Image (cartoon, rainbow, N blue to C red):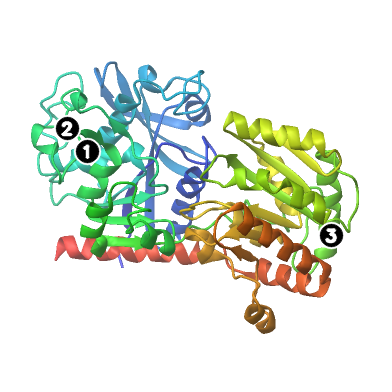
């Protein structure tokens, strides 16, 4: 079995730049694939944080005028990853959020910024860098969605964009077949929609603007183009793969996705269990394991102290680590604050997002001192402490492609309380009567995803907490559950190899 080479294209990658779970996936999957005879080179934009982390950077290509300015492609390593970095200061030399300006709105040139990423990916995939000949081009989310599009369509004739030595029309790989293409949808709600008038500026030929190309209800859809033109589509859980084939879940793409259902695969995410390892985690107050659960108590005490909560090992402490948005269902939790008080629960919340929701949780913390603590923002070390110290972790999402927070919670013995959607439904075994009798429960699911539904789940959680023997059993089940990348990586490896066999048959 020969080694394969994958060119992964992503707008963020842990530990270099992260806004969400996509970065964790992009950082961990290549490491898991190495053990399966698959090497990955990851192409990422040259944000300031990425540039600062590079070691041994070597320029492998220069572009005098790439979408408005000069650019270089650098080959380097960082964070244990083999990287290609698109160093285009006019597009990426901006501090802060990779996608949003200081005013909290999308950068006005996001179309050009991520078209440049996709074009460079297609150029590399088409053999434009000596020594790199990928078998697979794997694009992640809308920001990389044009990579398979350029590989299929680009004739390289557009000025101030892709050049004449860019990807060939028809996507033929220099010296042989073009690589197979895969696109992973991490969240279909974010699609990269831009005005149709940008088609020429993006270096896309007129024929690409059609139902089988980038056209999306009269606009240009970066993700839509990738979904239409990639050889394989994956989502980050089996249930989410099924949900996006429904009118409600497809976000306007139900016709396309149903047409392409034969190449759609739902593959659960994993977590890097070397970073997320309670037995060796240096970011928490006390390391612990499934056989040494008593050591977990110190983390709870530390968490209560950090959030200004009343000390007490017997009080049920709920944790939240989340973007504060309607998708994540945190407005439902705000509506149920009275139930938390009624049941005598504590809440430690870490997150940021919609201003009204941030203000709502800050007001709740002020109204319930010692019982509700709220920290607006994100802190990686504090996220680890919440997983290690909370008794239960709330994830009441209205939809959730996979979710990584509940996987970390399982591994750290923080019982997940989740809505029955997407990857949450696929990863948590509900503590219903049958599962409790069989001794297989790992958490609590609820449906419908309403304030009443979440309220019922909170009452179930409180009842289970009172039965400490059952609770400990759930904790042990959860911590023994395999949430690593081993099985998901094997599925990706099989998908890659099947695609290579198909294309070389």
What residue would you read off at disc 2? 166
Label 3 to label 2, Cα distance in Å? 57 Å
What residue would you read off at disc 3? 295
Nearest the eye: 73 or 47: 47
Q: Secondary structure at mark 3?
A: helix
Answer yes or no: is residue 26 visible: yes
Q: Are marks 3 and 2 in contact (CB under 8 Å)?
A: no
Toward the bottom, the furthest residue is: 438
Q: Are marks 2 and 1 in contact (CB under 8 Å)?
A: no
Say whether disc 3 or disc 1 marks the residue closer to the N-terminus: 1
Image quarter where the C terminus lies is bottom left
Q: Secondary structure at mark 2?
A: loop
Left or right: residue 400 versus residue 133 is right
Residue at x 83%, y 68% (from the top left corner):
466
Left or right: residue 407 versus residue 399 is right
Label 2 to label 1, Cα distance in Å? 29 Å
Say whether disc 3 or disc 2 marks the residue closer to the N-terminus: 2
Residue 338 picture location, percent across and down: 76, 48
Say whether disc 2 or disc 1 marks the residue closer to the N-terminus: 2
What residue would you read off at disc 1? 217
Query: Tag 3: Cα neighbours inside 10 Å, few (<14), some, or many (≥20)?
Result: some
Callout in the foreground (2, 1): 1
Residue at x 29%, y 25% (from the top left corner):
112
Residue 68 picture location, percent across and down: 27, 16
**Quarter of image, res 63:** top left
Nearest the eye: 446 or 226: 446
Residue 305 picture location, percent across and down: 86, 41
Residue 481 picture location, percent across and down: 61, 69
């Amino acid at each position: 079995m020969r080694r394969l080479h994958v060119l992964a294209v992503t707008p963020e990658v842990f530990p270099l730049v992260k806004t969400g779970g996509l970065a964790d996936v992009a950082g961990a999957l290549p490491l898991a694939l190495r053990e399966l005879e698959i090497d990955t080179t990851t192409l990422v934009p040259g944000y300031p944080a990425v540039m600062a982390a590079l070691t041994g950077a070597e320029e492998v290509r220069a572009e005098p005028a790439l979408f408005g300015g000069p650019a270089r492609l650098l080959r380097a390593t960082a964070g244990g990853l083999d990287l290609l970095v698109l160093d285009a200061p006019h597009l990426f030399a901006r501090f802060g959020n990779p996608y949003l300006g200081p005013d909290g709105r999308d950068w006005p040139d996001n179309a050009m910024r991520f078209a440049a990423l996709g074009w460079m990916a297609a150029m590399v995939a088409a053999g434009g860098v000596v020594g790199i000949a990928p078998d697979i081009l794997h694009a992640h989310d809308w920001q990389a969605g044009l990579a398979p599009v350029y590989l299929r369509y680009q004739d390289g004739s557009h000025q101030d964009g892709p050049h004449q030595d860019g990807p060939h029309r028809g996507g033929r790989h220099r010296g042989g077949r073009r690589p197979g293409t895969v696109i992973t949808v991490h969240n279909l709600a974010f699609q990269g929609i831009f005005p149709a008038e940008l088609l020429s500026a993006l270096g896309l030929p007129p024929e690409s603007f059609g139902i089988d190309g980038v056209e999306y209800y009269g606009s240009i859809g970066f993700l839509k183009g990738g979904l239409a033109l990639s050889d394989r589509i994956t989502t980050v859980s089996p249930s989410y793969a099924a949900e996006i084939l429904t009118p409600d879940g497809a976000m306007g793409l139900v016709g396309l996705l149903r047409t392409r259902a034969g190449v759609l695969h739902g593959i659960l995410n994993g977590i890097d269990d070397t970073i997320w390892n309670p037995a060796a985690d240096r970011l928490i107050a006390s390391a612990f394991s499934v056989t040494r659960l008593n050591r977990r108590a110190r983390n709870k005490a530390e968490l209560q102290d950090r959030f200004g909560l009343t000390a007490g090992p017997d009080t049920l402490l709920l944790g939240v680590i989340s973007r504060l948005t309607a998708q994540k269902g945190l407005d439902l939790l705000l509506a149920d604050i009275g139930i938390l008080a009624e049941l005598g629960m504590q809440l430690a919340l870490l997150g940021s997002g919609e201003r009204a929701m941030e203000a709502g949780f800050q007001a709740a913390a002020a109204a319930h001192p010692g019982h509700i603590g709220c920290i607006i923002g994100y802190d990686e070390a504090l996220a680890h402490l919440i997983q290690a110290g909370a008794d239960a972790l709330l994830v009441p999402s209205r939809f959730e492609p996979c979710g990584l927070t509940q996987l970390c919670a399982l591994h750290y013995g923080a019982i997940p309380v989740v809505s029955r959607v997407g990857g949450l439904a696929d990863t948590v075994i509900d503590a219903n009567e049958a599962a409790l009798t069989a001794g297989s429960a790992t958490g609590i699911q609820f449906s419908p995803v309403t304030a009443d539904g979440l309220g019922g789940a909170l009452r179930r959680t409180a009842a289970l907490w009172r039965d400490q023997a059952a609770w400990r059993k759930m904790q042990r089940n959860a911590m023994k559950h395999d949430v690593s990348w081993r099985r998901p990586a094997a599925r990706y490896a099989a998908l890659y190899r099947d695609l290579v066999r198909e294309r070389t048959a």
